[in-house]
Amino acid sequence: MLGSPKEGGFGLIPFEQHVKSRHACLLIRTLNLLFQDIHHPYAFLVLDLLAHNSPTYTPLALLTLGRTYKHLRDISRSRPEYVSLFNRIKRLMSSVELQRWTEALATLPPPQDIDPIPIVFGPWVWATPLWGNPFFTSPLGFSFKMMCPVVSCHGKLIFIANLYYAYQVALTFLVRFIDPVLGTIWDYNLVATWPQGYC
């Protein structure tokens, strides 16, 4: 039924794939509008839905949420550490619009940085989103939260600055309360590598 008559079909288009591609196209245009001075009403709808359902996620998270949600749905049954994260994203998917958009974007290849100019780190890094950031994805397109399922469920850790502050608080707690008990066996060099080595 599907495809050109020259290929043995009856001229029908794959309706489900066509609809998802239109949703993905519309959402990509909307995300582009979010970085302009004048926002389109549709862009405000995206912001309002995310703010209402999950303030932790920025609009860029829509690029990774669909693929991550499908993967979590498959592995959370056998990996208990991912259950809490899956339930959190599942609540986000209770919005029909957000679910439709993320599923549509999940049909596209993982986003890539195509700018020929390398990224220069600076103060802007502190405001970089942690969860759903397309620049923090695995080769398969799964977002950073898949590497830190327990930490990503923390409602206040939205940006790198929040994560660094939480790390400093945890380090202060360890030094103040645990070090006097353990004495000299505490390795401060090991503690300093925790964000990279343990998350």
Image (cartoon, rainbow, N blue to C red):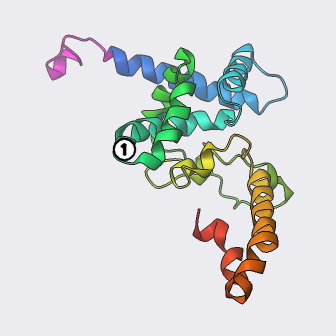
Which picture quadrant has residue 122?
bottom right
Query: In the figure, 20 relative to 169: above or below?
Result: above
Residue 184 seen in this snapshot: yes
**Residue 126 as seen in the image, left or right of residue 145:** right
Horizontal and vertical percent position of residue 119: 72, 59
**Residue 152 as seen in the image, left or right of residue 109:** right
For this orientation, the residue located farthest to the bottom is: 184
**Residue 8 as seen in the image, left or right of residue 12:** left
Q: Which residues are magenta?
A: 1-14
Main secondary structure along the magenta-highlighted residues: loop
| Residue at 72% over, 46% down | 157
* SS at badge 1: helix
Horizontal and vertical percent position of residue 95: 56, 18
| Residue at 74% over, 14% down | 41
For this orientation, the residue located farthest to the front is: 181
For this orientation, the residue located farthest to the left is: 8
Residue under numbered circle 1: 75
Horizontal and vertical percent position of residue 170: 75, 62
User: Depth check: 149 or 45 in front?
Assistant: 149
Give the quarter of the figure containing the N terminus: top left
- Density class for disc 1 (Cα within 10 Å; few <14, some 14-19, many ≥20) is some
Give the quarter of the figure containing the C terminus: bottom right
Q: Amino acid at mark 1?
A: Ile
As for residue 177 lying within the magenta part, the answer is no
User: Depth check: 118 or 54 in front?
Assistant: 54
User: Depth check: 17 or 57 in front?
Assistant: 57
Which picture quadrant has residue 169?
bottom right
| Residue at 71% over, 21% down | 43
Residue 108 seen in this snapshot: no
User: Depth check: 14 or 161 in front?
Assistant: 161
Horizontal and vertical percent position of residue 65: 53, 36
